[in-house]
Image (tube, helix red, strand yellow):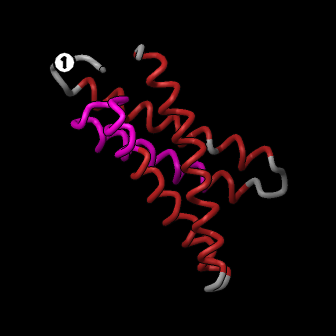
Amino acid sequence: MKPLMVRVWLFIVMCIVGGLGATVGSVVGHSFGSRGLFFGAIVGGLLAVSLVARFAAWRGWIAQSQWRMTTLGGMLGFLLAAFIATRTLSSPVGPVLSSLLIGAGAVLGAAIGASRRSDPLP
């Protein structure tokens, strides 16, 4: 697969699964009240980001040595997206568009991880 397509797939899957992880986490956390809803969304999203980074390494989208930086970038993007989403709940546009930060963070993290390697991206 071409390097551009690898980045596109990583971006798309990270955005979708990161958002779904937050959704599932918030549903599970809702049974513990409003704080549980927020905490569940954060934990679910961060767990989903970590799983997608592992999946990307397994699929060969990123090298095994890149998964830490990919995970870190995706998690930072997720936390920023969660911050923006909670501040823009009056409109569906803010939360939906903020999820793009998850994928952007993961792709940036993968690129930083690749720059630390001696061989190029797969």
Lateral position of residue 100 relative to residue 54, left or right: right
Q: Position of residue 66 (x, y in %)?
A: 27, 35
Check disc 1 and report the residue beneath it: 119
On the image, which quarter does residue 27 sit in? bottom right
Lateral position of residue 107 relative to residue 39, left or right: left
Q: Residues within 10 Å of mark 1 (few under 14, many from 20)?
A: few
Residue at 36% x, 34% y is 59
Lateral position of residue 52 relative to residue 87, left or right: left
Front residue (pair 41, 61)? 61
Residue 79 magenta-drawn? yes
Height in image: 55 above or below 10? below
**Main SS type for the magenta part?**
helix
Considering every residue shown, the one lying at the far bottom of the view is 32
In this rendering, the count of numbered labels is 1
Classify mark 1: helix, strand or loop.
loop
Q: Position of residue 2 (x, y in %)?
A: 42, 13
Lateral position of residue 29 relative to residue 86, left or right: left
| Boundaries of the magenta span | 53-82
